[in-house]
Amino acid sequence: MKKNIGKRLKSIFQLEKKPKKGFLLVEWVVMAYLLFTLVFALFMYTKLENPNAIIWGRLRIVAMTAALWMVYRIIPCPFTRMIRIVAQMGLLAWWYPDTYEFNRMMPNLDHLFAAWEQSWFDCQPALLFSQKMPGAFFSELFDMGYASYYPMIALGVVYYFGWRYHEFERASFIVMGSFFLYYLVFIFLPVAGPTFYYKAVGLKKIMAGIFPPMHDYFNFHQDCLPSPGYTDGLFYQLVEDAKAAGERPTAAFPSSHVGISTVIMWLIIHARNWRLLYVVLPFYVLLCCSTVYIQAHYLIDAIFGLISGTIFYFVLLYLSKGVKRI
């Protein structure tokens, strides 16, 4: 066992015989999204609140990407290749608030999604779910599911690096490509989600089936409802801390939490690791349910997150089929 671990660790730092000369797939995805949003930012320069920060932030990412490429060319090994990919994935949280900076220039659409929700389900599931399943047990269970989002992504990426390294770059491309496809949707589809919309409108109106348009309200207000559930719970506090740290009235439809976790599940199925699938499956189910339970998303968002995540996975899998295995 120790010999196998030692051999694997040694191989991570072993110089590659045929190092990759150009960008990795993940870096091409980042550069494509960066260029598109940079052009969009320049075109909308006078309407953006802080365009210089958006532009210079992108230039810093270009510089970082070039620097990591140079390090890899000097020391071409699996470790420096992994650093290039992990660095880009680590910036996903930096890219997320950008969707709010762009879509706030357009009128909010929550009133339409809340009305569709009412029409389809004859209620507001995001309002009633936690009321139907109250108490500390269910609260902590669903909050744990929601908090497992990033660990689930990390687990999928680490698994491919450690046990299916020949497809590591391809798997990373599928995950990153899915993220940026969602970000593009969020830029042009400004939906804040129940926690922001319900707070802005007032629960009495929501319960009465009144869904007024908010226009540019979320340009100036970012208040949201506290998550329902057991306020003294460990996972409840983790979710609330995450919301306080970086949540914005954006990115509700479709649910990227559901979508990206669906992509991870498909990657595990692709690897035919059924034991890992059975371990992750309960967290996946809880995560999908939790997006509605904590009022982060409408049920419509979760449903289309599942559908879009599956579509993104198979499209990106197809596009990357010609990638040379490493």
Image (cartoon, rainbow, N blue to C red):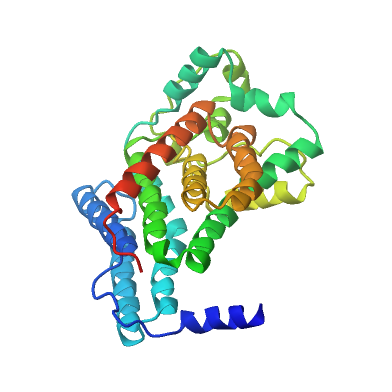
Please tell me whether residue 124 is drawn above or below residue 39 in the rendered image. Answer: above
Q: In the figure, residue 200 lies in which quadrant?
A: top right
Residue 191 in percent (x, y) is at: 43, 33
Residue 318 in percent (x, y) is at: 30, 47
Horizontal side, residue 134 vs residue 202: left or right? right
- Residue at 28% x, 69% y is 62
Please tell me whether residue 90 is drawn above or below residue 185 in the rendered image. Answer: below
Horizontal side, residue 303 vs residue 81: left or right? right
- Residue at 71% x, 46% y is 236
On the question of residue 236 being in view, the answer is yes
Please tell me whether residue 269 is drawn above or below residue 209 in the rendered image. Answer: below
Q: Nearer the viewer, residue 173 or 1?
A: 1
Numbered label tally? 0
**Quarter of the image with the C terminus in it:** bottom left
On the question of residue 88 being in view, the answer is no
- Residue at 34% x, 73% y is 64
Residue 210 in percent (x, y) is at: 52, 15
- Residue at 52% x, 57% y is 156
Please tell me whether residue 21 is drawn above or below residue 287 in the rendered image. Answer: below
Q: Nearer the viewer, residue 312 or 297?
A: 312
**Quarter of the image with the N terminus in it:** bottom right
Residue 274 in percent (x, y) is at: 59, 49
Q: In the figure, residue 27 lies in which quadrant?
A: bottom left
Q: Nearer the viewer, residue 208 or 320?
A: 320
